[in-house]
Image (cartoon, grey):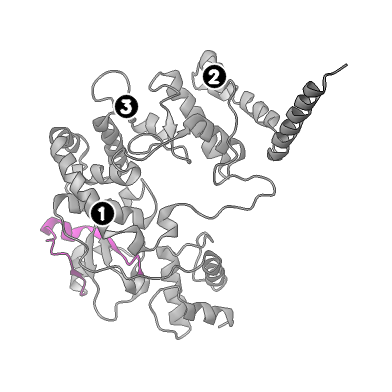
Amino acid sequence: MMFPALRRSLAAAALVLGLLLAARPALADAGFDRWLAAQWPAAQAMGISRATFERETAGLEPDYGLPDLALPGKPKAPDRQAEFVQTPAAYLSDKAIATYAARGRKLAAQYRGQLAALERQFGVPGPILLAIWARETSYGGAKLNHDALRVLATQAYVGRRKEEFRAEFLAALKILDEGHVTRAAMKSSWAGAMGLTQFMPTGYLEYGVDLDGDGTANIWTDVPEALAATASLLKEKGWQAGKRWAYEITVPPGFDCTLAEPETRLPIGEWLKRGVRIADGRRVPPAALRDEASIIMPAGPYGPAFLTPANYFVLKSYNFADLYVLYVGHLADRIEDDRPFARDWAEIALVKTRDLEFMQKVLTREGFYAEKIDGKAGMKTRAALGAYQKANGLAVDCWPDAAVLAHMKKGG
């Protein structure tokens, strides 16, 4: 005979268990366990020991609360990346950049010798490296609380870029197997990026630099080695030593904004002959006049414009968003010489993603646009908008405003 109190306790436990099971997503952990076990042959082929594989995957469970998962019945979450959801004025906050620049100048003095050595080795100036460190983890102050292996396994299992994250998951196991970091210390962002300057595991294995000869590249707590990894990546991507990342400019009256896109490149000297002027007081060295550059206008007619030579696009290999590159490059300039942008960023309203997607579909249908439909007003989208405005007799400013949207919705 079961005592009433015991019966009530068991009933309560059953209820709690039932609620927990009901709260689980449709994808059962058994499926994840099967997927995990199936990764062993690839791990073995990479030289990862069975002991490491068993130790690090034992008890590993997916984190279904992460963004950007492809869970059945769950709609795609909106983009969380600040570069795509903030206006230029908000993202490139002068107050925030000035604060980081002040801290950056102190760090530049603290690490003067190491930064000079990195520039000699890789050609990348110290202020650029410090600016990336600031943007990525607030000079190490950002809290990275996610278990990197769990993040990467989850994304490889049910993420929207499974194969990409499967490679990262295996690379993370390789890092653990080689003893570069402990599992407890292998913390990451929600997207799986690790360390002071935010490297994915494959990037760590490719670009990590062991400066002190201890057998590991410590991007987690060793500032010079974290910055060295960043410098190594930028050099490999084509950083040109002694060259600037960009010049703030003014464009001449009547400038054709459809030319403000990456594939329209001219020597800097030719742009200057066409009426482009350097706006921030910087001098273009004679040798740089022959360097090819594009023009970008990130806020269209509502903010600064820039001449962007090769190093600008090298920075985009770290983060493809133009606002990110502008933040890093401008912060690096402010660490050296604390001057704000020559022209202010106006406060503008972002066009809704669904409206931009509609515009991109219309532009694609009418032959002005051949890129991804992503709801983002990138340079190619804005150039295509300018071409549409030209073709339809509208005022040409290459900007996705209400007037061009209304014109498209009326069918021209």
Mark 2 crowd level (few <14, some 14–19, many ≥20, 10 Å Cα): many
Residue reaching furthest to the right: 1
Which label belongs to residue 53? Answer: 2
Instruction: Work out whether residue 295 or residue 266 is closer to the camera in this orientation and state it.
Output: 295
Front residue of 121/340: it is: 340
Left or right: where 65 falls relative to 341: right
Task: Give, as a three-letter code, the residue at label 1.
Answer: Ile
Residue 53 occupies quadrant: top right
Q: Position of residue 386 (x, y in %)?
A: 42, 75
Q: Circle 3 sits in a helix, a strand or a loop, which is it?
A: loop
Label 1 or label 2, whichever comes before in sequence order = 2
Give the residue pinned by disc 1.
97
Q: Amino acid at mark 2?
A: Phe
Please say if the residues under marks 3 and 1 sit with CB atoms less than 8 Å apart: no
Q: Residue at x 47, y 28 (%)?
A: 171
Q: CA–CA distance between discs 1 and 2?
A: 43 Å
Rendering coords of residue 18 (x, y %): 75, 34
Q: Amino acid at mark 3?
A: Asn
Mark 2 secondary-structure assignment = helix
Q: Is residue 233 left or right of residue 339?
A: right
Residue 112 image offset from top left, x and y in percent: 13, 36
Q: Give the residue number, with chain letter if any, for mark 3.
A: 218
Image quarter in which the C terminus is found:
bottom right
Depth check: give the residue in front, 409 or 361.
409
